[in-house]
Amino acid sequence: MYSYIKGEITEIKATNITIESYGIGYFVKVPNPYSFTINSKTIIYIHHHVREDAIELYGFATSLEKETFEKLISVKGLGPKGALAILASASPQDIYTASKNSDAKFFIKFPGIGQKLSQQIILDLKGKLNFEEEATIQDERIEQVGLALKSLGYSSTEIKNILKRLKLEPDTTLSDAVKMALKMLRS
């Protein structure tokens, strides 16, 4: 099982990217391949999908997108291809809001999703989503701060509490964000 791959984007195609990490190129299907940049170093959050006839890696720019994808593919009748189509056009927050408000029309606009599957998505996701908690971790820098704190040995509970309170300005660097979090942990 993979959590993420940290490496360099070496190839971008219509439905996937290749990310090289330690000399190995991983073929990863992503919702928006052109949101990545060739030769850029990045972290891709990975879902390892195993079926009878295929083993595939699905990648996401944030862990929130990955969690949303995993919740979507748990819906009866919705596979990885349909879940990627939804995430290609909608943010996790949009999906959560549509599910919370029972907005069937929102899901029908995606390819391969009719009225019945739209209702199934709403039914299956309603009990699984914690909208308020998930929405607080949207900023990628906040996720990176969380990873840094984890590597320093802080507990998941401490990290969650700090990340909820951490407010970053658009020009705040990752280094400054980590320093702010450490200062908050000490106080």
Image (spheres, rainbow, N blue to C red):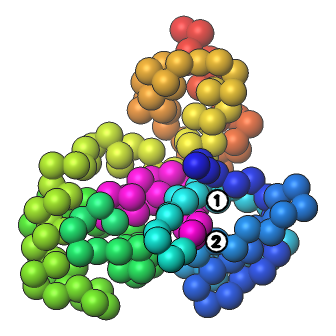
**Could you tell whether 152 is left or right of 88 in the image?**
right
Q: Which mark is residue 28?
A: 2
State the image quarter where residue 154 is shown: top right
Instruction: Please tell me whether residue 111 is drawn above or below residue 89 in the rendered image.
Output: below
Is any part of residue 170 visible from this angle? no
**Mark 2 vs 1, N-terminal side:** 2
State the image quarter where residue 153 is shown: top right
Q: Which mark is residue 44?
A: 1
Local crowd at mark 2 within 10 Å, few (<14), some, or many (≥20)?
many
Q: Which mark is residue 140?
A: none
Q: What residue appears at the point 16 percent right and 60 percent down from the top-left corner?
A: 124
Instruction: Please tell me whether residue 179 is drawn above or below residue 184 in the rendered image.
Output: below
Tag 2 secondary structure: strand
- Which one is nearer the viewer's eye here, 49 or 114? 49
Query: In the image, is residue 99 part of the stretch drawn in magenta?
Result: no
Q: Which residues are magenta?
A: 55-72
Give the amino acid type for the residue marked by disc 1 in the picture: Ile
Q: What residue appears at the point 35 percent right and 46 percent down from the top-left corner?
A: 134
**Could you tell whether 61 is left or right of 109 in the image?**
right
